[in-house]
């Protein structure tokens, strides 16, 4: 009699490396592990950064990024993909070529502006994102600055966020979650909209802390992790938001560096999940 064979729910992150450990590949892998998933990675760029900002970005050759993705997917066959920083048009187009072959959830955190205000994408890459990569993704998760770049709209209110979400859907997004963390006021609003017209407003109370480095990376990778475990998109978003909120809450008074510190990804780590093969 054959014994039951199990595997770990696995997730691939395609993103840049943050040598300070708070964002990018490092935050994604910490998130996958904390939620009980097996994390894999394809590195798009090596950055020189810390909690104070980003000073250099060195892109990897597009074909090397493609080869990393293919090597992981052919062998481990991940259940979801998270995409983070893709700094130029060549990388965007190369990633689009390979990910269109995988019928799994793809969560794109459209990283363009860091918490420090540093621009993390070349100017000619924005149109490539809109026409080449975004239409392939299950969900796109821009913050206010990134949504403004993608839509050429000023976004200062929850109403502006809703209008920007509509514009992104009209432009080809399958689903979008615009994050309102930079809005002024005691409450935070995230707005979800998809091509079927389903809309949802997520609310939470703002936490008074500067330790928010890597929040967007963490949210998108948590969504991908929950989807790899089989949760539906809106449920995965809700669970990911709770995880990020608690990670911020549990790290709000911890000093790491002299700028925007990281979240506490490991405030309540889960055991590795197992699913039947």
Image: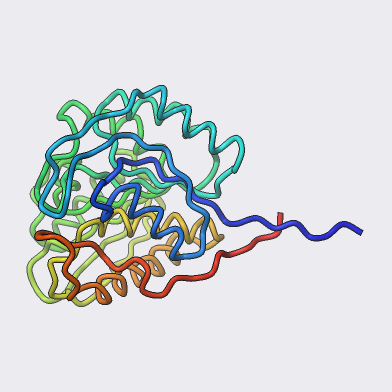
Query: On the picture, is 211 further left or further right than 220?
Result: left
Q: Position of residue 164 (x, y in %)?
A: 20, 50
- The residue sitting at 75% across, 56% down in the picture is 5
Q: Quadrant of residue 182?
A: bottom left
Residue 198: image quadrant is bottom left
Which residue extends farthest right?
Answer: 1
Which residue is at the front of the view, 191 or 91?
91
Q: Position of residue 141 (x, y in %)?
A: 30, 52
- Left of 253 or right of it: where is 18? right
Apparent side of residue 145 relative to residue 41 in the rendered image (left or right)? left
Image quarter (top left, top right, bottom left or bottom right) of the C terminus: bottom right
Residue at 79% x, 60% y: name it.
4
Horizontal and vertical percent for residue 38? 52, 54
Residue occupying image coordinates x 8% and y 49%: 154
x, y (%) of residue 246? 31, 75
Q: Nearer the viewer, residue 9 or 184?
A: 9
């Amino acid at each position: 009699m054959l014994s039951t064979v199990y595997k770990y729910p696995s997730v691939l992150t395609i993103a840049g490396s943050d040598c300070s450990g708070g964002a990018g590949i490092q935050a994604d892998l910490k998130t996958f592990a904390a939620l009980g998933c097996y994390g894999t990675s394809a590195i798009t760029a090596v950055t020189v950064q810390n909690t104070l900002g980003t000073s250099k970005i060195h892109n990897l050759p597009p074909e090397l990024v493609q080869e990393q993705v293919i090597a992981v997917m052919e062998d481990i066959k991940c259940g979801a993909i998270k995409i983070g920083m893709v700094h130029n048009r060549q990388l965007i187009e190369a990633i689009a070529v390979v990910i269109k072959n995988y019928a799994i959830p793809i969560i794109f955190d459209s990283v363009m502006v860091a918490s420090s205000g540093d621009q993390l994408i070349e100017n000619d890459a924005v149109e490539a994102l809109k026409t080449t990569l975004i239409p392939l993704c299950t969900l796109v998760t821009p913050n206010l600055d990134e949504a403004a770049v993608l839509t050429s709209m000023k976004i200062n209110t929850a109403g502006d966020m809703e209008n920007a979400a509509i514009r992104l859907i009209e432009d080809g997004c399958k689903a979008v979650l615009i994050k309102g963390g930079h809005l002024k006021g005691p409450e935070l609003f995230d707005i979800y909209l998809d091509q079927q017209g389903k809309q949802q407003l997520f609310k939470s109370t703002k936490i008074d802390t500067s330790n928010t480095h890597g929040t967007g990376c963490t949210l998108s990778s948590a969504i991908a992790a929950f989807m790899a475990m089989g949760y539906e998109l809106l449920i995965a978003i809700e669970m990911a938001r709770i995880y990020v909120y608690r990670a911020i809450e549990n790290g709000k008074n911890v000093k790491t560096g002299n700028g925007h510190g990281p979240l506490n990804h490991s405030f309540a780590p889960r055991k590795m999940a197992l699913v039947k093969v």
